Amino acid sequence: MRAVTLITDEIPPLMHSDSGEKALNWMEEFKVSHLPVLKNGNFVGVISESDLLDQGNPEWTLDKLFQHLPRPYAYEGDHIYQVLAQMAEHKLSLIPILDKDEKYLGCTSVHHLLTLIANTGSIKENGGILVLEMARIDYSMAEIAQIVEGNDAKILSSYIMSSPDSTNIEVTLKINTVELDRIIRSFERYEYIIKASFQKSQYAEDLKFRYDALMNYLNF
């Protein structure tokens, strides 16, 4: 998914002439802690709730409260992974999306992105989850896929987690079967460490619980 397809119409931008009080009210209404700010139709930056609260004088206009604002954004052609990386790097609850000429097109929020991710791709596909641990230098998706496919199964998606202070990585696999016992035994024969597995009714119940908990949190 490209950034332009992630834009939500639910969150409007602020104008530079809007008050800090209006910004805080909108943040509460839209359940975000950041909002984009425009001046004469041009994107000038992102305002945060914490910066507003630090300033005081919420009745003042934004251009009077702030001479400069940070300008994190994503381009319309960026992949969803790049959008998420930008949001994580700048600790944003939303991110503006611009075209190649840096014209403001709209924004997307963490809530909107997680809802899209939860309702698309392999997340809702029936199957099991397997978490492997291995040394970084031993990682081979070709070998992992061969082991899974050797048990008449397919990898629907994979995710790699690593830590800068460790030489090991975790590989999370979504597999198109809830019967993982044979696959687990095969990985163990190849001396892979099985960190966790979610299968059969245990997987379905756990996924539903986590999904419901996430949606309840986002709608809080």
Image (tube, grey):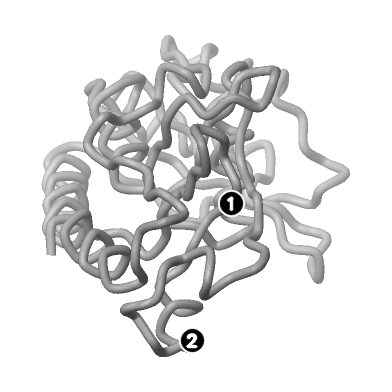
Quadrant for the C terminus in the image:
bottom left
**Which residue is under mark 2?**
55
Which residue shows up at 70% across the image and 55% down it? 162
Which amino acid type corresponds to the residue marked 1 in the rendered image?
Gly
Which residue shows up at 51% across the image and 24% down it? 3
Residue 137 in the image: above or below residue 78: below
Which residue shows up at 44% across the image and 78% down it? 52
Which amino acid type corresponds to the residue marked 2 in the rendered image?
Gln
Location of residue 207 by image quarter: top left
Spatial separation of the CA atoms under disc 2 and disc 1: 17 Å
Residue toward you, 34 or 52: 52
Q: Position of residue 69 (x, y in %)?
A: 63, 61
- For label 2, the SS is helix
**Which residue is under mark 1?**
45
Which residue shows up at 49% across the image and 62% down it? 47
Q: Position of residue 19 (x, y in %)?
A: 34, 67
Q: Is residue 46 visible from the viewing direction of this image?
A: yes
Residue 3 in the image: above or below residue 162: above
Q: Position of residue 93 (x, y in %)?
A: 42, 56
Q: Position of residue 164 (x, y in %)?
A: 80, 64
In-image side of 6 versus 125 (left or right): right
- For label 1, the SS is strand
In-image side of 135 versus 38 (left or right): right
Residue toward you, 26 or 142: 26
Callout 2: 10 Å neighbours few (<14), some, many (20+)?
few
